[in-house]
Amino acid sequence: MQPPQIVAAWQRGDIDAAYVWPPALTEIAKSGKIIADSQQIGAASVPTFDGIVVDRAWAAKNPKFMAALTGVLAKSYADYRATGAKWTADPTM
């Protein structure tokens, strides 16, 4: 979703979390809280392509899927840390 759609989804209660930047962040922060910022995420060497968030109740009902998903994400983050230059179309970036 693009930031305007994220704000609309937040205001409707369709989503419980988002990774956005101002002005969408400013709007969402009015009724939510910031749990991590780009500096913190970058310091953890986590690529910021898109975020994946699930409802706690859904996650509790689907533990095998969640374990598999987080395993795949952990492997991809490790590969990104080891070979990040290969993850871009321009390896000089």
Image: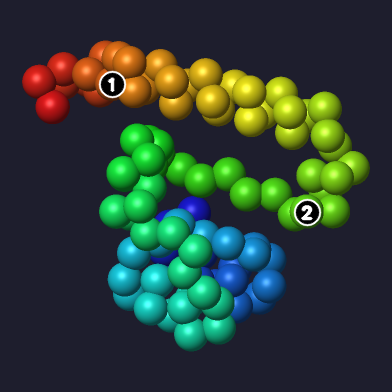
Give amino acid for label 2: Arg
**8 above or below 63?**
below
Percent across and percent down for residue 20 are 40, 61
Left or right: 86 in relation to 61:
left
**82 above or below 16?**
above
Q: Quadrant of residue 43?
A: top left
Work out which residue is located at the far left of the displayed protein and give it. 92
Q: Residue at x 31, y 44 (%)?
A: 42
Left or right: 26 in relation to 65:
left
Looking at the image, tell me whether mark 2 or mark 1 is earlier in sequence order: 2
Percent across and percent down for residue 12 are 66, 75
Give amino acid for label 1: Gly
Q: Residue at x 64, y 30 (%)?
A: 70
Quadrant where the image shows the C terminus: top left
Percent across and percent down for residue 61 are 89, 42
Q: Residue at x 59, y 71 (%)?
A: 10
Label 1: state its secondary structure. helix
Percent across and percent down for residue 63 are 83, 34
Q: Residue at x 67, y 28 (%)?
A: 69
Q: Are marks 2 and 1 in contact (CB under 8 Å)?
A: no
Q: Which residue is mark 1?
A: 84
Q: Is residue 2 visible?
A: yes
- The residue nearer to you, when weighing 82 against 49, is 82
Check residue 39 in the rendering and tell me which mark sits there, or answer none: none
**12 above or below 39?**
below
Other residues around mark 1 within 10 Å, as few (<14) / some (14–19) / many (≥20) = some
Q: Is residue 5 visible?
A: no
Left or right: 60 in relation to 41:
right
Check residue 56 in the rendering and tell me which mark sits there, or answer none: 2
